[in-house]
Amino acid sequence: MISLALEDVVRVVGGRTSANDPDARVTGVCTDSRHVKPGDLFIAIVGQRLDGHHFLAEAVRGGAAACIVSREACEAMGGAPAATPGVREAMSSVRHAMPGVPEIKLIFVHDPVTALGQLAAWYRREVLPRRTKVIGVTGSNGKTTTKLMMDHVLSAELTGRASVRSFNNAIGVPLTLLSAGFEDEYLVVEIGTNSPGEIDHLAGMAQPDLAVITSIGAAHLEGLGNLDAVAAEKATILRHVRAGGLAVVNIDEPALLAHLPATAASRGHRDGIRGEVKAFPGAGVVVGEHGSPGRGVDGTDTSVRTKSRISAVQCGEPFRLCTVGRSPEADLYVACIEGDLDGTSFVIDGDLAVRLRLPGPHHATNAALAYAVGRWMGLSAESIGERLYSFEPAAGRTRRVELGEVTLIDDCYNANPSSMMAALDILATVRGRRRVFVMGDMMELGAASASWHRRIGQCAAAAGVDVMIAAGRLASSAAEAAAAAGVAEIVVCDDACDAADLAAQRVGDGDVVLVKGSRAMGLEAVVQRLETALRPVERRMKQAV
């Protein structure tokens, strides 16, 4: 983070402060008192389990320069009346609740999360250098893997960073933006949603120079409704791409096409990919709604529509659009996909052969998205190809683990129907004594949840699953459908802990095990138990020593 004057922070968030200090500055932002460093601005957030206001003393002792707090929460800490008594009284309440803390600078606001977002939007707009290119990534599947892949590609030649873990919500996105420093040439920001309007809000905060849509799938249907609504929500990121920027979108799901802006006819864009980076790729996006005439970034008329794209998104500024997919109709197409559990090979745009050490054909498209971003940022095709080959997935995301004579596919981080089907497609390609599928519930699917789970059970049978361990009430529906479709051995249990015990008991030499479920199911417990139980004996002995 670039050092900020505390008085600027107070002004931006519209807060009232307990101590005016024109020389005070903040050099970082933190929401976890355990990780506060000297000079940090601590944001006291009221969460589902913990209230940050109870940890103000710890944050101050850790070196926090100031704390953004809720006035109402501070009053409650000191037993003050419900009516707002003002800053002095609220400060007195905090001091009463934290004896032994001699000095603390508080910034009182109505809602600390809103204040965090306001600060991040201002920081992005007014403080972050123009040369720092913000890359916003959204999609139903593959956001985190594609984000990490792009960071790995760009870091070969550029200085920058990506959001940690899945920092993709109203807290994670602003923390990511505020983490960028003056030296950074790029910042990859993951943007998620589970209800209408979230991407619009977060993308407006991030104002990406480059926007990436990884996929459209049946995710968060409880809040979004249907696949078309999912596509519409993801496409709202395009409203906020800065002038002269780039949008890279995966068009393999047709639902997205109706929500893409109209573009001018492509004129030798593939030659541009191989030649001048500034000419890559395609033409400028129309300015205005429903395909109204406009001018692209190169001054050309953008009123002509191409392919099946229509404008359902209000775009305020011209930028370039690059479509990616497995069809030659895409601006950047992915072909000749081959693979097994060791990795995936494919060809980008007809002449660049790429090898990933990551199984699954869907990762070929993710790599093509990273390729487009890398080329736009000035890297050569050869450099990008080398970095894609050296990329390794994070834990829980299609990670292959060899445990003696057992092969584990650790894809436990999260799940929805499309990602579940993609994982089963990978399992279907693997030869082994038995295919074992440990499945957890898929969350937030709304009224269609039961039917989606039954469909996954049928897909498990089609993938040749021999043993299915279903953890959770919803997954039991999938198990019933799998049994009806011919899966020989079915086990149903309540949660991840039971599934871990059952898997450790039933998995044997030669088996291939896929573990996948929604984040809330905590299936990493299954992975950890299998790693402990099946790790080769010599490694266990070495660790014991």
Image: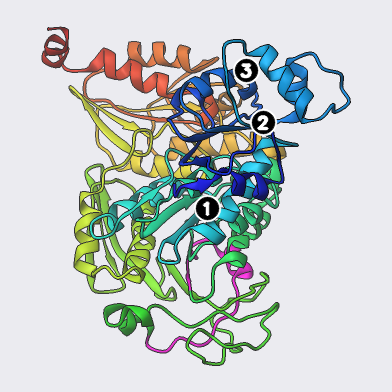
Q: Is residue 27 left or right of residue 52?
A: left
Q: Identify residue for label 1.
A: 139
Give whichever of discs 1 and 2 has the lower sequence position: 2
Decide if residue 168 is in sight here.
no
How far apart are labels 3 and 2 at the CA level? 11 Å
Q: List the residue tagged with mark 3.
A: 54
State which region is magenta: 245-268
Q: Residue at x 28, y 19 (%)?
A: 531
- Find out whether residue 476 is within the magenta segment: no
Residue 467 in sight here: yes
Disc 2 is placed on an element classified as: strand
Front-most of 159 and 407?
A: 159
Circle 3 or circle 1, nearest the eye: 3
Q: Is the residue 284 above or below the residue 532 in the image?
A: below
**In the foreground, 513 or 177:** 177
Mark 3 or mark 1: whose residue is earlier in sequence: 3
User: Residue 208 location in percent, x, y?
Assistant: 51, 62
**Mark positioned earlier in the residue sequence (3 or 2):** 3
476 vs 51, nearest the viewer: 51
Q: Is 544 left, or right, of 269 in this rendering?
A: left
What amino acid does circle 3 point to? His
